[in-house]
Image: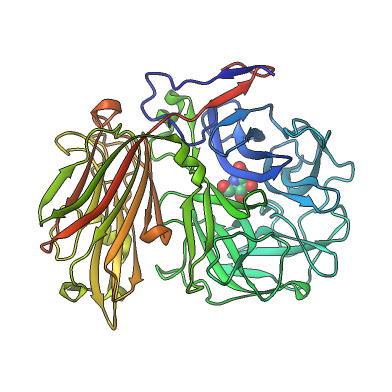
Amino acid sequence: MNFIKYKVPKKQPYRTWYHFQSPQNWMNDPNAPMYYKGVYHFFYQHNPHAATFGDKMVWAHSVSYDLINWIHLNHAIEPSEPYDINSCWSGSATILPGKEQPLILYTGIDNNKHQVQNLAMPKNPSDPFLREWVKHPQNPVMTPPSGVEVNNFRDPSTASQGKDGKWRVVIGAQNGDEGKVVLYLSEDFVNWTQDPNPFYATDNTGVCECPDFFPVYFNGSTNGVDTSLHDPSVRQVFKISYLCRHEDYYFLGKYVCDEGNFIPDVKFTGTSLDLRLDYGKFYASKSFFDHAKNRRILWRWVNECDTTQDDIEKGWAGLQCIPRQVWLDESGKRLMHWPIEEVEKLRDKQISIMGEKLVGGTILEVSGITASQADVEVLFELPELENAEWLDESEVDPHLLCSEEYASRSGIIGPFGLLALASEDQAEHTAIFFRIYRAPNRYVCFMCSDQSKSSLRQDLDKTTYGTIFDIDPNLKTISLRSLIDRSIIESFGEKGRICITARVYPSLAIDKDAHLYVFNNGSKSVVISELNAWSMKQAEFVQEESINKL
Ligand code: DQQ
């Protein structure tokens, strides 16, 4: 097999070094991630003709042995038949037990612009790269049911099998103001019937896109669970991407599989109390169970925050976060996220700082690494929490709080954190920070990613992101990890309890001119208990020679 190596062109300061991107043009949702015959597969929504969304979307396909270095293959699924001639939209893979055969359900936009669900199978299941896919002769296998708009019926999930042997998938939909998720059942994966009971409905959220439905262990274990396991050791996660908000929310709850009945612990409120997978730029996530390493892995699309014209000039748009392992925390109330361990293979030169006290107003440079591509982990030792300021969180919107130049304002315990992708004079920087408050009967932490000074350029969306979460009143330390990669910063607070992803486009803080700082603007000192930062090597992206040259 011959491969062509892809190199980041010199004049592409925003092209990432180790985050997955399409070789060129537009990319959006992750589709059908899976592990099959020793190989990880990743498909994605792609417009092969432009750096903008298109009207003939295809499924692009890449494979990897470690989820970090990738081989791009030919497109797996393209519009070709009346039932998908106007685009092949998102879907999922299910590996049937016994036969060990992967099947894909995807949404086709048909010749009437209706959305239908189609089935595709590998032409040669013994090819570990699954290069070629064939469409089932009985397609479409599902058409819009009554009570669902014909142009809003899409994104079938991975199927789970009940004790009755039947397969179940959930599909996103809409009817008028009502966003919906509908449940379908099948004995043979080809003939599907809709469950007559309403599965999920919500008002004013738009289409419930890309529903994901999977179990997690309820005992603090970080192990993943196969999608079809339903027993008392697991709780169910139901994730929805709400079109009107362009944000991913999830619910934890009970699932009685054979009754098709999911009961969320808490309903959607439309407020900052709702649980989100990531509080930044993040959409259309999809998970899979990696049985090679017994873990559940989450992928998701991170769109650009520059202009369409910029995307056209760059020749590409969209990237994917580093895949994250997800599990339920010990309290059973939140998902935890952590970048897959394989990303650590890219760690290169390391800098450490131990036991450094940061008095109020300190800014300390973390020098000696490539600050434009870095992995930084820092553990802050906190002062006594009883010193914290008062906050009535019911009266604040965390995003707004974050946009009021909070990093540079002084508080008591915080703001403290990192200034990433910063210019030497800090005129440009993205501040990722914590600030701790006293709230009625408890302490809370505000975590923020502030992009307002991320670039001197004016034509960018510099929305800031923030969230408030409860902390243990005896908390002594708090951790922050940021994966920095030229135009993306993925941050993980409190060991992965809170994630915020941001896109930034510095005009000064590029390549060797990018700097990394740690700061404290709180009047109480915090101590860098331990900081480790690594330069990150470039991941390897190659393309099979048989297809379009780069
Ligand atoms: N993107 C796909 C749809 C999905 C949306 C089209 C979510 O299937 O609903 O590219 O980003």
Farthest residue to the bottom: give it.
Answer: 441
Number of dots carrying numbers: 0
Residue 538 visible somewhere in the drawing: yes
Q: Is residue 246 above or below residue 396?
A: above
In the image, residue 148 lies at what x, y percent? 71, 61
Question: Is residue 155 rendered to the left or right of residue 535?
Answer: right
Quarter location, residue 110: top right
> Which quadrant is the C terminus positioned in?
top right
Residue 78 visible somewhere in the drawing: no
Quarter location, residue 2: top right
- Model colouring: rainbow
In the image, residue 124 lies at what x, y percent? 83, 33
Q: In this view, does 29 lie above or below 468?
A: above
Q: Which of 449 and 352 is in front in this view?
A: 352
Q: Is residue 313 above or below residue 501?
A: above
In the image, residue 211 lies at what x, y percent? 62, 58
Question: Is residue 174 rendered to the left or right of residue 389?
Answer: right
In the image, residue 292 lies at what x, y percent? 66, 48
Question: Is residue 401 rendered to the left or right of residue 238?
Answer: left
